[in-house]
Image (cartoon, rainbow, N blue to C red):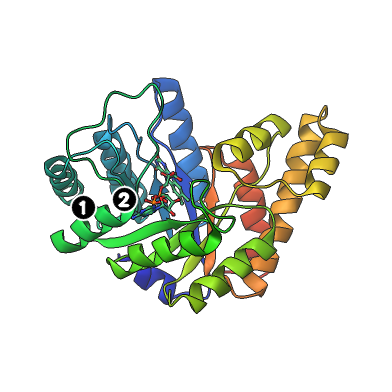
């Protein structure tokens, strides 16, 4: 099914993000997690794609398994920074052969130790959106940044670039994770004022450890609110208390987002189920969704 139609057809959609596992043990663990999370009937799930360009097959294969064996609608993430145009055409063909019709078109980041870029590389996600849209047959989503993408000179400049992705053919946006809902609501208002009319689904990561939070904040540039940092500092040596705190924080964050009109929630699961299940169960018990 087309993800945009799923978003439009529901009061609120719930989705999960997974990444392709590296080892046999991780693969087994992931399939257990997917089986558990399936019981919560997500509207769709997404599978990440390495920005090195090394493993499009892994993304396509996992997305296909999720669709065929678990009956859930997949979105394949599709990064372009390491690919040439012919490679992008091949990956698009591969995805179609795997029955994948929803993609999240992304630029990706070039690592300092990455091999040299290919000739005529893609520079920005909008170029990929344009090519995939011309290719046809995909419902295309893109990334948005409530706290601004770290490289963008200003929030306004970043939103103008986001508008280019939507104008090129993207029909939904999934956001980077954030912990301050005011940032999401202000971002949505600014997007609407800039003429971006497509649904903007907030990305949520329940905190499961102090270390993990700091790592993600550094990686994606999201701000950790003072009260969250202080609360976690107090309990950082009690791992179970941190998980419980993270569940409660995410639940309250999600509830406010939905109450104030977010079209759904996209959970960054990190291939684990406990916290996402706890948050979503509480929301579903209160009648959120569908
Ligand atoms: C929901 C979500 C899922 C993700 N999944 C993955 C994944 O599976 N694999 C992965 O490797 N990474 C993933 N990422 C991370 C993403 O690849 C990085 O954040 C990357 O730095 C930017 O990707 P983008 O698609 O937003 O890039 P773009 O939209 O190209 O934007 C990147 C930067 O360039 C600027 N810009 C855009 N166009 C222009 C232009 N013409 N001139 C000048 N500046 C411009 C933008 O303002 C922004 O600062 C994900 C991020 C999100 C939010």
- Res. 82 image quadrant: top left
Residue 11 in the image: above or below residue 71: below
Pick whichever of labels 1 and 2 is earlier in the sequence.
2
Residue furthest to the front in view is 153
Q: Could you tell me which residue is drawn at 26 percent across and 37 percent down?
A: 56
Q: Could you tell me which residue is drawn at 56 percent across and 36 percent down?
A: 219
Residue 285 in the image: above or below residue 30: below
* Residue 290 visible somewhere in the drawing: no
Residue 18 in the image: above or below residue 10: above
List the residue tagged with mark 1. 99
- Res. 243 image quadrant: top right
Where's residue 186, x and y in %? 62, 69
**Left or right for 151, reference 95:** right
Where's residue 164, x and y in %? 34, 65
User: Which mark lies nearer to you, 1 or 2?
Assistant: 1
Q: Could you tell me which residue is drawn at 27 percent across and 38 percent down?
A: 61
Circle 1 Cα neighbour tier, 10 Å, few/some/many (<14 / 14–19 / ≥20): some
């Amino acid at each position: 099914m087309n993800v945009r139609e799923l978003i439009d057809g529901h009061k609120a959609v719930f989705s999960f993000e997974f990444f392709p596992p590296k080892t046999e043990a991780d693969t087994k663990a992931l399939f257990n997690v997917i089986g558990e999370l399936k019981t919560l009937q997500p509207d769709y799930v997404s599978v990440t794609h390495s920005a090195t360009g090394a493993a499009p097959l892994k993304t396509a294969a996992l997305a296909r398994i999720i669709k065929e064996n678990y009956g859930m609608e997949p979105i394949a993430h599709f990064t372009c920074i390491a690919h040439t145009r012919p490679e992008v055409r091949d990956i698009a063909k591969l995805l179609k052969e795997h029955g994948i019709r929803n993609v999240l078109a992304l630029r990706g980041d070039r690592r300092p130790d990455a091999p040299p870029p290919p000739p005529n590389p893609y520079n920005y996600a909008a170029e990929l959106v344009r090519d995939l849209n011309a290719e046809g047959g995909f419902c295309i989503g893109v990334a948005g940044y409530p706290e601004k993408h770290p490289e963008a000179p200003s929030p306004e400049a970043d939103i103008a670039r986001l508008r280019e992705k939507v104008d090129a053919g993207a029909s939904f946006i999934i956001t980077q994770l954030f912990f301050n809902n005011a940032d999401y609501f202000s971002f949505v208002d600014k997007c609407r004022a800039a003429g971006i009319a497509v649904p903007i689904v907030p990305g949520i990561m329940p905190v499961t450890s102090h270390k993990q939070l700091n790592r993600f904040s550094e990686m994606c540039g999201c701000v950790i609110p003072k009260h969250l940092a202080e609360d976690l500092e107090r309990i950082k040596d009690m791992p179970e208390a941190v998980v419980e705190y993270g569940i409660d924080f995410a639940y309250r964050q999600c509830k406010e987002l939905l109450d104030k009109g977010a079209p759904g929630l996209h959970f960054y699961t990190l291939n684990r189920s406990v916290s996402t299940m706890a948050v979503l169960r509480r929301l579903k018990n209160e009648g959120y969704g569908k």
